[in-house]
């Protein structure tokens, strides 16, 4: 049995979705464990051209069970619209499980995101205003609403009332905006419940039972943020992610630097990184190697910027550009690196 993890080390836009789409053809399950509908990727296949924002990339393969894990910021309306958009183009109705523990992205998350950007003015973060930051803030503050809450109306009303009380204090006194209406939101949630009812299930148990049965191959879509690598991902296989570990993030940065120093995604910088390091710090091997790694990390960032600029007009992954440009110089770089290190 084998698991595949598609990991992005460049803050997004590396082509994770496209690679997962390729792996999905020989997979039993494709799991999206976190993130929201604020970004996406384009897939072109026999059915046409599709822009996915929240559905897992295995959605086009009838044999694949697609799972939306409980780390996902679930925008029900966008999910249903996306499902309709693919089936309208002839894609067979997909096998989809929405974790009952997934948390709902609420209308007030989008409002809060917009209000905060407005309040910050010239110091705004440049948010997509999709409600992602307020959503995860509520998740970790334990005031979010989960899919399972939709099926217990008494609990749903209680949790919604508590959340709205906090939001209204913020909306009225910090942002000077109208108060939220609990009853209107409650009715919206009941409508959302019916939209996703056929897909809701115990994704945690499903995944673990599949693993226990020895399914041949499961492809998992992970997005690794260098400054916020959430733990428990390996253990829960796309279920909940609760904490961030900076130590792992630092390791990720170092690994990215090592890879860049060795492979050199931008040919020119990749070739001269070892020589620049030697000129700056001399031939002391203990200092030269880590310094080269740091220069390699800088090269990765520069390569990412250049790759995005080149790739954007053609809607292809920046990583493809970086690989094509850097690949032919692999052997030369290895030889130059060994010479610089005196090996």
Image (spheres, rainbow, N blue to C red):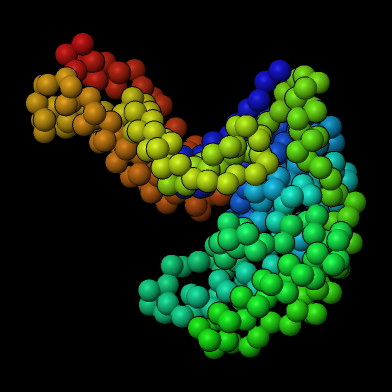
Question: How many numbered discs sit on the rendered protein?
Answer: 0
Residue 113 seen from this side: yes
Q: Residue at 65% across / 85% down in the picture? A: 179
Residue 260 seen from this side: no
Q: Is residue 300 above or below residue 262?
A: below
Write down the quadrant of residue 257 in the picture: top left
Q: Position of residue 342 (x, y in %)?
A: 16, 13
Whether residue 201 sits left or right of residue 208 in the image: it is: right
Q: Position of residue 57 (x, y in %)?
A: 70, 42
Q: Position of residue 92 (x, y in %)?
A: 88, 44
Q: Is residue 272 above or below residue 161?
A: above
Return the residue nearer the eye: 173 or 280. Answer: 173
Q: Position of residue 54 (x, y in %)?
A: 69, 52
Write down the quadrant of residue 263 in the picture: top left
Whether residue 94 sits left or right of residue 142 in the image: it is: right
Return the residue nearer the eye: 38 or 209. Answer: 209
Query: Quadrant of the image for the N terminus?
Result: top right
Q: Residue at 85% across / 56% down in the picture? A: 196
Query: Quadrant of the image for the C terminus?
Result: top left
Write down the quadrant of residue 77 in the picture: bottom right
Q: Residue at 60% across / 44% down in the picture? A: 241
Q: Residue at 26% across / 35% down in the picture? A: 294
Q: Is residue 95 above or below residue 53?
A: above
């Amino acid at each position: 049995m084998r698991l595949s993890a598609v990991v992005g080390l460049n803050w997004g836009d590396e082509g994770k979705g496209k690679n997962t789409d390729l792996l999905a053809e020989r997979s039993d399950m494709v799991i999206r464990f976190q993130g929201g509908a604020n970004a996406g990727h384009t897939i072109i296949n026999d059915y046409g051209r599709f822009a996915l924002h929240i559905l897992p990339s295995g959605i086009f393969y009838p044999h694949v069970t697609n799972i939306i894990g409980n780390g996902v910021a679930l925008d029900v309306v966008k999910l249903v619209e996306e499902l309709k958009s693919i089936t309208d183009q002839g894609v067979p109705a997909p096998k989809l499980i929405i974790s009952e523990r997934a948390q709902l992205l609420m209308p007030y998350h989008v409002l809060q995101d917009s209000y905060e950007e407005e309040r910050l003015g010239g110091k705004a973060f440049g948010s997509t205003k999709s409600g992602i930051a307020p959503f995860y803030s509520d998740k970790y503050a334990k005031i979010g609403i989960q899919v399972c809450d939709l099926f217990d109306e008494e609990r749903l009303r209680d949790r919604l009332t508590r959340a709205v009380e906090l939001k209204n204090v913020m909306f009225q006194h910090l942002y000077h905006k109208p108060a939220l209406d609990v009853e209107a939101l409650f009715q919206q949630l009941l409508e959302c419940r019916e939209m996703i009812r056929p897909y809701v299930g115990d994704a945690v148990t499903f995944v673990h039972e599949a693993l226990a049965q020895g399914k041949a191959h499961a492809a998992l879509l992970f997005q690794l943020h260098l400054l916020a690598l959430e733990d428990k991902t390996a253990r829960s296989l796309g279920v909940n992610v609760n904490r961030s570990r900076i130590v792992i993030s630092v390791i990720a940065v170092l690994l990215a630097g090592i890879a860049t120093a060795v492979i050199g995604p931008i040919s020119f910088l990749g070739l001269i990184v070892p020589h620049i390091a030697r000129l700056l710090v001399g031939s002391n091997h203990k200092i030269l190697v880590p310094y080269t790694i740091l220069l390699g990390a800088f090269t990765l960032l520069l390569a990412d910027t250049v790759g995005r600029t080149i790739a954007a007009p053609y809607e292809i992954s920046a990583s493809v550009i970086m690989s094509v440009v850097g690949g032919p110089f692999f052997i030369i770089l290895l030889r130059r690196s060994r010479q610089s290190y005196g090996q």
